[in-house]
Amino acid sequence: MKIRPKRLQKGDTIGIIAPSSPPNLENLKGSFAFLEELGLSYQLGKSLENVHGYLAGTDEERLEDLHEMFANPNIAGIICAGGGYGSARYTDQIDFQLMHENPKVFWGYSDITFLHTGMNLYSDIVTFHGPMLASDVGKDTFSELSRKMFQQLFNPMELFYTEAISPLTQVSPGIVRGELTGGNLSLLANGVGTKYEVDTKGKLLLIEDVGEEPYKVDGMLNQLRQAGILDAAAGFVIGDFSGAEPKKRPVTLSLDEVFDHYIGKLGKPAVKGFKIGHCEPHFAVPLGMEAELDADNLSLTILPGVE
């Protein structure tokens, strides 16, 4: 089992970094009141407001922020301001031993998936796939359930997802237990053939994405299929795929048909419809923790991500 970071306490300081693209600074500032409601202080990464094209500063600047937040004993956890693109550009330069020796809450999603996968493989720590400050928290659309998800950082709690949260659909029947891994499908596909290829052997694979029409999702799942990643997984947690309406190819298979083709035919427990990803509400989950997917009763149970 992975190393669980220590729970947050009121009065703790969290580090805020932009590991990928420049965040919307107005939305970021709008998120600070929520952090204060949680009883948290915050410290901004040095390169947080930097802009280097589509990146929040150079690779070296963003990497330095990441390393400094893990190395700083006064920082209890790290929450990403936003995603976008760029975390994979410096993953091969990350000091994963530093993170292993200083495990702390690390929270984000989307492009942050590449960092989650790297930390899961080489730091052996639990990380959190959840809504980010500028991308989600600082917006008017930030929902009550999304707000409540941050409580898992303060109190070790078992998470339980049922149809009380959103309609769920069985893709394949069965009940399976395993470590939860995965995240954004595009980033998982980008990792194929690298040192940061997601390890799904005996695990539950979470996938989600945004703005990818069915033929693109088809291509990415086919890449995972041919790499043996789908076959190695014990079960599948299919999150939100918003903005998937076909534009480039109006004659299309549906997303449901794509999921049935690549995942349904494997005959392993699989459920779709989880509000996990680029959506509201956004159900935050600890990656690296043991979970149980019950595709017969349409539920997902995950052990606490902090100690």
Image (cartoon, rainbow, N blue to C red):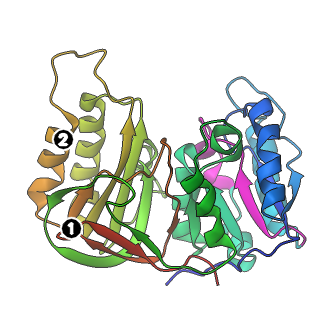
Q: Residue at x 50, y 48 (%)?
A: 281
Q: Which residues are magenta?
A: 74-93
Residue 191 in the image: state x and y as whole percent. Answer: 44, 49
* Position above or below: 69 against 123: above
Secondary structure category for the residue under label 1: loop
Residue type at the position of mark 1: Ala
Residue type at the position of mark 2: Asp
Residue 303 in the image: state x and y as whole percent. Answer: 47, 80
Along the line of sight, the residue nearer the viewer: 105 or 41: 41
| In this rendering, position of residue 16 left or right of residue 282 | right
Numbered tag placed on residue 256 in the rendering: 2
Residue 262 in the image: state x and y as whole percent. Answer: 17, 49
Residue 183 in the image: state x and y as whole percent. Answer: 45, 53
Tag 2 near tag 1, CB within 8 Å? no
N-terminal-most mark, 2 or 1:
2
Q: Residue at x 36, y 61 (%)?
A: 164
Estimate how packed mark 1 is, as few (under 14), some (14 to 19) or many (20 or more) residues with alpha carbons within 10 Å.
Answer: many
Residue at the disc numbered 1? 295
